[in-house]
Image (cartoon, rainbow, N blue to C red):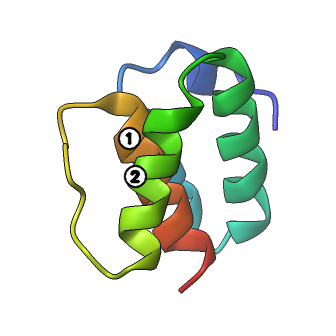
């Protein structure tokens, strides 16, 4: 997914949730991959958020954008 607005937003979690609310789950995964590619070196934080979501726990650190994206994308795509 390519979007200038999505690249410039200060709240990418909101973009992912908006896509899901519009039944565009087909774009949510791609948006997550694009976010990860643009934030190289943060995989451990993404993975912690994703692991927490897979285990059914709430977002462990809402103030951490990368961890929140990992949690949100996982929650939205594996429900």
The image quadrant of residue 27 is: bottom right
Marking on residue 17:
none
Q: In the rendered view, tell whether residue 69 sits above or below residue 39.
A: below
Residue 17 screen position, x and y as percent: 45, 58
Confirm whether residue 18 shows in the render: no
Q: Are marks 1 and 2 in contact (CB under 8 Å)?
A: yes
Q: In the rendered view, tell whether residue 3 sits above or below residue 57.
A: above
Q: Is residue 50 left or right of residue 60?
A: right
Residue 19 screen position, x and y as percent: 58, 57
Q: CA distance from mark 1 to mark 2?
A: 5 Å
Depth order, front residue of 34/19: 34
Residue visible at 18% across and 32% down?
63
Depth order, front residue of 53/16: 53
Residue visible at 67% across and 56% down?
28
Q: Is residue 9 left or right of residue 10?
A: right
Q: Is residue 21 left or right of residue 53?
A: right
Q: Is residue 34 left or right of residue 40?
A: right
Q: What is the secondary structure assignment of the residue under circle 2?
A: helix
Residue visible at 74% across and 24% down?
37
Q: In the rendered view, tell whether residue 7 sits above or below residue 73.
A: above
Q: What residue is shown with label 2?
A: 49
Residue 7 screen position, x and y as percent: 61, 18
Residue visible at 52% across and 48% down?
47
Q: What is the secondary structure assignment of the residue under circle 1?
A: helix
Confirm whether residue 54 shows in the render: yes
Residue 9 screen position, x and y as percent: 45, 20
Q: What residue is shown with label 1?
A: 67
Q: Quadrant of the N terminus?
A: top right
Q: Residues within 10 Å of mark 2 (few under 14, many from 20)?
A: many
């Amino acid at each position: 997914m390519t979007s200038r607005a999505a690249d410039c937003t200060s709240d990418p979690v909101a973009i992912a949730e908006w896509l899901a609310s519009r039944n565009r789950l087909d774009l949510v995964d791609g948006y997550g991959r694009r976010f990860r590619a643009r934030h190289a070196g943060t995989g451990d934080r993404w993975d912690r958020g994703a692991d927490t979501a897979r285990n059914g726990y709430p977002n462990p650190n809402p103030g951490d954008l990368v961890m929140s994206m990992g949690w949100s994308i996982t929650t939205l795509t594996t429900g």
